[in-house]
Amino acid sequence: MMSENLVVNAEDLVKTYQMGEVKVHALRKVSLQVKQGELLSIMGPSGSGKSTLMNILGCLDQPTSGQYYLEGTDVAQLADNKLSQIRGKRIGFVFQSFNLLPRTSAIANVELPMIYMGINRGERRRRAVTALEMVGLGGRIHHKPNELSGGQQQRVAIARALVTDPAIIMADEPTGNLDSKSSVEIMGIFQHLNEEQGITIIFVTHEPDIAEHTRRVIRLADGQIVEDKTIANPRRAGVTEATPLEGGVHQPSLAVQGAA
Amino acid sequence: MQLWESITIALRALTINKLRTILTMLGIIIGVAAVIALVSIGNGVRQSMNEQFTSLGTNLLTISSGGRGGRGGGPGGPPGSQEEDTSQDDLLEKAAEPLTMKDVEALTDAAQTAHLVGIAPTYSVNNLSGGVVYEQEEADDVSVTGVTPDYAIVRNMTPEVGLFISQEDVDRRTRVAVLGYEVAETLFGTNLSSAIGKSVRVNNAQYEVIGVLPESGEGGFGNPDNTLLVPISTAQTRLGNSGTFRGSLQVSNIYVEVDSQDNMDYAEAEVTAVLRERHRLGTEYKNDFNIQNQAQLLEFGDTLATTLTAFLGSIAGVSLLVGGIGVMNIMLVSVTERTREIGIRKAVGAKRRDILTQFLIEAMVLSLFGGFLGIAVGYSIAVVLPMLVTQLSSTVVTANSILLATGFSAAIGLFFGVYPATRAARLRPIEALRYE
Ligand SMILES: Nc1ncnc2c1ncn2[C@@H]1O[C@H](COP(=O)(O)OP(=O)(O)O)[C@@H](O)[C@H]1O
Ligand SMILES: [Mg+2]
């Protein structure tokens, strides 16, 4: 089967919202295959269906019709509890608005998915610390979200997404609320996770220079894929920056973490 | 997810908004405390009523003059509370004959067949001038009653010191007196033996104290500690003036002790028959006397206390219910407020059951913890209340009422928590995350 090393295999995804009398066609037959280890960005104007697609691929929502195989498993019509389990174990989600638990320390936020996986406290703590170190927040594990900058909060969210060793990380406009410097830092982290650990990452952006960091760029318009191009030489985050990444994303110690 | 994790999450959530948590608990605390305290009052009333009734003797019939409705019971007698008897409703009434010593004799003759083991007529002296005096001391409001030796049997009285009134005292109409504890204490202090042989003045005549009764500590109606007993003959003819009826001295009450509780109804019927014959009542007439059955009184008291307890308990139950609704209200607010949190939890892998248990545990912790505090408060109230309210001799906190309150508050947490928790668990992650 061709799906052997496909993390995402979606065929003819349709999502229709019924708004009173009117039907809103958010997705019109979107098909998408993503191979293990890919880093790709989805672009498109506002309202083109990017978030709708991400939510379906991230198992937060279900398509009106179409097939979706995640790592070979048909998840399009799974029950609520089963989806929770898949979200917890196989998917890491990063949102534009961070979505961290308020009044809760960075480390507790990162531990959250592991609580629902039934991992014991000691193991949870150890893995959360490692994940936070990986995103360069090893020194701020006890800070609460309101004590962190936007970029730092998003890095906590990324740590939470990667701590469960997911098959794929979905990031919906992760830099949308960040200044350009923080945005580049976040991109650097994604590139690093993708290259060093082989984590498959899909992220949405509407900023062309952010999309240039990925080898594959997909363009959505009006609920359909209108372009699927490959960039020969994606930009490297941090390379053109005068200052190195805060917290040392490029520290060699990170490389010892094997690929997922 | 382990239960312990759910509990930790719930406790954390509750400590974030402490004031709200405490205010919500307050509803439960007040409710449970009210249940414990009010039920303890009901049980206390039952206990003291039981004690008072049994101290009068459980196999006791009290006969007084006058038809039904003419409630007898001299001083020291039980309260008029005979159970409603409708069997004589359509009979005629006849002017009531007083009870006399002849009635007593008739009952004595029938004692064997009616299972009577003691027959004690009393005569209450009502025309006392002043109190009971010894030297400078005077005891007021003393009820002076003439009795026979059987009185000691039927009322379960043995003098603490000295002797009771003897048959010889009755026959010879001697001026001797047995003092109630309070009277003796007023006149002679706590050294009761010092009273024996002294003379006290009642109605300008001297009476030799031959005995002192033990403290009953009852208080309330016809306080048996504030009495003075003399031979019935002395009371009828020397202290008071009972007058005669058909040549026989009148009595106020006749106490009759029955050999066993099982024979109470039979004995009551026999006594009724004897007295009706004595008073020449044809079948068309109602009784012109009144019989109080102690067993019925006990039963009645118990019913009364149960009703009182149920009444007080249900009032308290209402406030507990209000507290429970408070828990539900706060939980609903909390679910709405934390919609986004629920969305986040579901997005990272929380199942419905995880969210459900988290909110259920929150509700349970609120109500159970409130319940425990409520038990402590209610218990304290139950302990302090009798000290503040003198009419209330005691309160009784039973293990039952504590179990009931605990169970009830757990049930309230569960009942009023299920709906908000289910609502939280059912939230779709995508909608919960979009919630602002
Ligand atoms: N819950 C919803 N109910 C109704 N319409 C929706 C809902 N979510 C999205 N849409 C509509 O679907 C279309 C795609 O939305 P979205 O995927 O959020 O676009 P993007 O993320 O690309 O801006 C839009 O027209 C939007 O109005
Ligand atoms: Mg969007």
Image: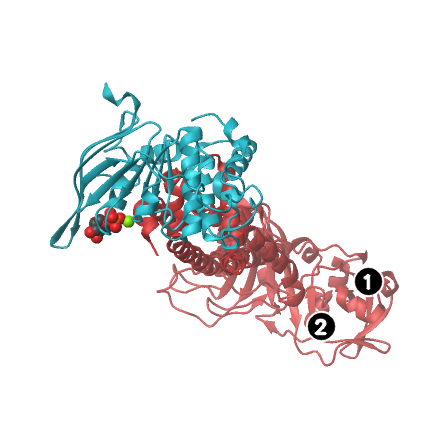
Q: Secondary structure at mark 1?
A: strand
| In-image side of B191 versus A197 (left or right) | right
Q: Are marks 2 and 1 on the same chain?
A: yes
User: Callout 2, which amino acid?
Assistant: Val
Residue found at the very far left of the displayed protein: A21
Residue shown at 38%/48% (left/top)? Answer: A175
- Circle on res. B142: 2
Residue B238 position within the rendered picture, expressed as x and y whole percent measured from the top left: 73, 74
Residue found at the very far top of the displayed protein: A1
Query: In the rendered image, which residue does mark 1 sit on?
Result: B210
Q: Secondary structure at mark 2?
A: loop
User: Callout 1, which amino acid?
Assistant: Ile
Residue B266 position within the rendered picture, expressed as x and y whole percent measured from the top left: 50, 48
Colour of chain B as rendered = red
Q: What subunit carries mark 1? A: B
Identify which residue, B425 or B323, lies in the foreground.
B425
Colour of chain A as rendered = cyan
Q: Is residue B48 above or below residue B9?
A: below
The span from disc 2 to disc 1 (Cα, nearest Å) is 17 Å
Residue B56 position within the rendered picture, expressed as x and y whole percent measured from the top left: 63, 56
Can residue B385 be seen at all in this image of the molecule? yes
Identify which residue, A67 or B224, lies in the foreground.
A67
| In-image side of B396 versus A38 (left or right) | right
Residue shown at 45%/42% (left/top)? Answer: A238
The colour scheme applied to this rendered structure is by chain
